[in-house]
Amino acid sequence: MAEIIIRSAVSSDLPRLADLDHSFSTDYVWQMETREEEASHSLTFREVHLPRPMRVPFPRSQDHLADAWVQRRCFLVAETQTLPRGYLNLSPGPVPDVGLVADFAVEPRFRRQGIGSALLLAVKQWARENGHRRLILETQTKNHPGISFCKKHGFLFCGYNDRYYSNMDIALFFGLNLR
């Protein structure tokens, strides 16, 4: 594997990043079940093994990336051999000292080679230097590889939002304290 360089995104990166294959394949999903009774309400997420692998598209349009680039506090690109291989951007979270990682992708043939981890390490450093005390990472309930990545890096499940994405998928949120 060539050296991974992490740098701030520039406008000329956007076409290449937008063209990355953001989809993923999964054998598991988090299935949500709610139960309402007279005096209680319960919610459970269960990890369910699918009968066959499922290919899942990215829940946002390519045009979204250009808008995100303008609005994000921190937009990092990972490159090898002078080509962008992945990116991560951080937007303002629900409170001032929390950052939300909403868009995070690595080119499929470069996944599981440390690029995502290098991006996450760089954004954690940036967040600490800029006064953030917490990061929240969002992902779909169908994104078992993303959920596994969150857990591997110490993020803990901290919430969900039903019908969050334009395709009406549920978003899961994983949090990590930085201090």
Image: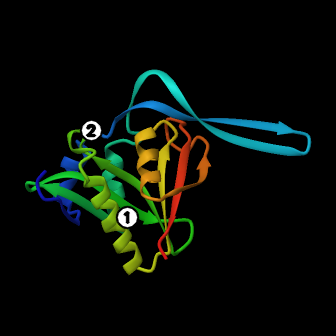
Identity, as a three-letter code, of the amino acid under mark 1: Arg
Q: Secondary structure at mark 1?
A: loop
Residue visible at 68% across and 40% down? 44
Residue visible at 23% across and 48% down? 113
Residue 99, image x, y percentages: 46, 67
Q: Between residues 12 and 54, which one lies in front from this camera angle?
A: 54
Q: Secondary structure at mark 2?
A: loop
Identity, as a three-letter code, of the amino acid under mark 2: Asp
Establish if 8 lies above or below 64: below
The residues bearing labels 1 and 2 have C-alpha atoms spaced at a distance of 21 Å
Q: Between residues 144 and 93, which one lies in front from this camera angle?
A: 144
Q: Is residue 91 left or right of residue 10?
A: right
Report the residue marked by disc 2.
21
Residue 43, image x, y percentages: 71, 42
Q: Residues within 10 Å of mark 1 (few under 14, many from 20)?
A: some
The image's mark for residue 111 is: none
Q: Residues within 10 Å of mark 2 (few under 14, many from 20)?
A: some
What is the number of callouts on the image?
2
The image's mark for residue 72 is: 1
Residue visible at 34% across and 61% down? 120
Give the mark nearest the N terminus, 1 or 2: 2
Colour style of the rendered protein structure: rainbow
